Image (cartoon, grey):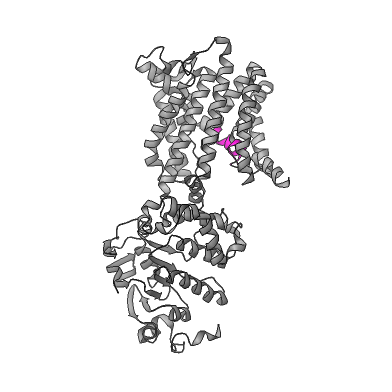
Amino acid sequence: MTTILHARGLNKSFGAVTAANNIDVGVERDSIVGLIGGNGAGKTTFINMVTGYLKPDSGTIHYEGRDITSLVPRSITQLGICRSFQIPQLFNTLTVRENLLTALGIVVIERKKFASASTLRSDGVDAVADETLERFRLAEYRNHVVGFLPEGVRKLLDIAMAMVVKPKILLLDEPTSGVSADEKFFIMDMVMDALRADNVTILFVEHDMDIVSRYTDRILAFYEGRIIADDVPDAVLNNAEVRKYVIGESHPPAAAGGARHAAH
Amino acid sequence: MIARDRTLAMLLIALPVCLAGGWLLPAWVQSLLVLALGKGLVVLGLVLLMRTGLVSFGQGLYFCLGAYAAVSVGKIFKLDNSILMSDALVMPLFGAAVAGVVALVLGFLLARYRAIFFAMLSLAFSMILYGLLIKIPALGSSDGFNISFKTVAGVAIAPAAQLYTLYAVAVVLVFFAALALHQYLRSHLGRLAEAVRDNELRVEYMGSSVRYVVHVNYVIAAVLAGLGGGLVGLSIGHVDPDLAYWTTSGEFVFVAVLGGTGSVAAPIIASLLFEAIKSAAYQYTPYTWQMVLGISLLLVIMFLPAGLWSVFQRRAKRA
């Protein structure tokens, strides 16, 4: 497999807090990577640097061999890296459908800039919007103004809007936070099903270890701005440092991924 | 959606009705209507900015430029008797073009600012123009100068028909401006304005430029203000630096709030109503006319917070 995203020597501090400490990591094409770590460990900072929201103090980020360290979020999105947000970022006075149409409009009408927009037909925007609504089970809310919708629905829409761009890399910042336990697997199943067909590389921040171990093929564990473990899920979740700093000793050791969510 | 489609039909009906009906109106009403239509155009642009989440307290800049531009260029380059100084169609269009070019340049700076900073910076630019104009004797300093027209699109107009002609020009210009804006608001770029107002971060993270959207809307608003200024200058027959003064800009914001942002027709109707209230107040309560205006705005804000247009919308929903 080839490396699609490569961060080298990333450093970022906010005053006395080190949010990224010499991060070196390569992400392989079509892989699904989980980012875990406590609050302030540097997961979101890493995502913010990859998507151009924050500039690293030093270090470089290469995407498909191209240096994207100094690009603005807009340009990075156009190259095919898209993200969802921990707190949904939506157009609150518009309806669910209008939110999607606006997102699709940006991709299709300004298509020349987008690497992957050829997969969408401009005359089919309405159809794509309706199909997306169905797929994300948002159809019943289509004409609801999103500012008044429950958090779980907003979260779904936020992810849907990132996905209609047809990114090559999708970064999901806590896709299941604020969502009820029984909806978590539904969201993740849906996202993974939709993306598997499109050959999308996924990085997602997650606190629920069941979800991380079930859906990823690699985990990066962050602690104080460093990556303290980087391996397949079982190895990371049983790593002594990760157990001490990220998961907490009181939790039982993770069994083989998948065995425990029979309960869900 | 239904309300929007109705706008198109409404405009198409309004054009001939206004053109024919205007002929029957007394001269003072025609004159008042030109004034209201001209200012309505400025407010139309302001409403467009409001949809983008911005309030400009400096539309007087473009309003004044639109009124001054044609004749000023004529005076400076000694183009006496050219169409720039005597054609009722060329003059407002030239003013609109000048306003658009100035906005294109200033837009690079202003598109970076939001909220109160955008409002104050736009106000500052309009006051700079005011300050410049009162110091230029060739343009009449604080007295300004008179303007008049003899032709429309090159056709000579008899003095007796001038008022109605100007009214017809205003109606036609407003019709095309409203039509163009209506189409624009239905386009992708037009719709992005609301997205920018709601969440700039998301727009950027979808891969579109917030600054570009703001810049485009700013230029369109300026072109409309320039066009309106050109019409108002001709209607009054005189221009002076007060057109760029901040109270003039404030009046546009007043009318925009009065009308609401519901439709392209709202600013025009609000402007007509505003001019009517203002003239009536001026006539019957010459010393306290501002109070009458203030009370009317207060009533609108209290009972129709979405502007006058919400009356029509409520009725449409009930029907």
Quadrant holding the C terminus of chain A? bottom right
- Image quadrant in which you'd find residue B117: top left
Q: Nearer the viewer, residue A230 or A121?
A: A121
Q: What residue sits 54% from the left and 20% below the top?
A: B235
Q: Is residue A55 above or below residue B303?
A: below
How far across and down, in percent of the image, does residue B75 sit?
Answer: 38, 16
Q: Is residue B246 above or below residue A15?
A: above
- Image quadrant in which you'd find residue B94: top left
Q: Nearer the viewer, residue B254 or B106?
A: B106
Q: What residue sits 57% from the left and 27% below the top?
A: B37
Q: What residue sits 45% from the left and 21% below the top?
A: B90
Q: Nearer the viewer, residue A53 or A145?
A: A145
How far across and down, in percent of the image, does residue B18 sit?
Answer: 63, 25
Which contiguous range is marked in magenta?
B251-265
Q: Is residue B270 visible?
A: no
Residue B256 shown in magenta: yes
Residue A112 shown in magenta: no
Q: Is residue B299 visible?
A: yes
How many numbered circles does the render carry? 0
The prevailing secondary structure element of the residues shown in magenta is helix
How far across and down, in percent of the image, does residue A4 sit?
Answer: 31, 68
How far across and down, in percent of the image, does residue B92 sit?
Answer: 47, 24
Give the residue furthest to the right. B319
Q: What residue sits 47% from the left and 81% below the top?
A: A210
Q: Is residue A98 left or right of residue A28?
A: right
Quadrant holding the N terminus of chain A? bottom left
